[in-house]
Amino acid sequence: MKTTVLQSLFKIALLLFGMAVGFGCDDSDEWNEEGMEISCTLAKTVENGTEVEYPTKIAPSLILKKDLTFEGNAVCNSIQGNYRYNADNGRFIIEDLIMTELACISPYSEAESMYLGYLKKISSFKQEGESIRLYFGKDSYLEYR
């Protein structure tokens, strides 16, 4: 019986601790209602602190619009979709990414696949002067100018 009481108290303590942590965190899902007006070209890609070399030289473009839509050029194909961001905490999410399906020959097809793979993982951003970094990890980002 002592074990049952101790287990119950332990479960209650865990529940209260979880509630305290949950209410103490400010993981706000408040998103900006108006987008950014940015037109830029990929300057570099960094993954885990190391600059990525694509199979060929590429310069994808990205246009972020005030209506929270984006469009651009991957490598061979055009892309578009929606994005959400929170200027206060730097969160940035790409949603509803669609693209044309034009044939793309090697090495351009591999470069496009790499770029789109990074773009789909974006979770935050940081704007500094004329550049914007879209992060997909702590030391991993796409830098546009």
Image (spheres, rainbow, N blue to C red):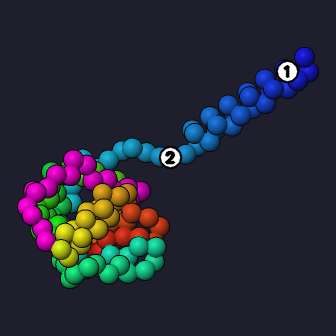
**Front label number (2 vs 1):** 1
Q: Amino acid at mark 1?
A: Val
* Residue drawn at (28%, 78%) of the image: 54
- Marker disc for residue 5: 1
Q: Give percent across and percent down for residue 140.
A: 41, 70
Mark 1 Cα shell of 10 Å, populated few (<14), some (14-19), many (≥20): few
| Segment tinted magenta in the rendering | 89-105
Identity of the residue furthest to the right in this view: 2
Q: Give percent across and percent down for residue 7.
A: 81, 26
- Marker disc for residue 116: none
* Residue drawn at (20%, 76%) of the image: 107
Q: Is residue 112 above or below residue 145?
A: above
* Residue drawn at (88%, 24%) of the image: 3
Closer to us: 77 or 60: 77
Quarter placement of the N terminus: top right
Mark 2 Cα shell of 10 Å, populated few (<14), some (14-19), many (≥20): few
Q: Is residue 92 magenta?
A: yes
Q: Secondary structure at mark 1?
A: helix
Q: Is residue 12 visible to us here? A: yes
Q: How many marks?
A: 2
Give the left or right position of residue 20, taking residue 10 as reference.
left
Q: Is residue 41 visible to us here? A: no
* Residue drawn at (91%, 21%) of the image: 2
Q: Amino acid at mark 2?
A: Asp
- Judging by the rendered image, the residue that carries numbered circle 2 is 26
Q: Give percent across and percent down for residue 136.
A: 39, 63
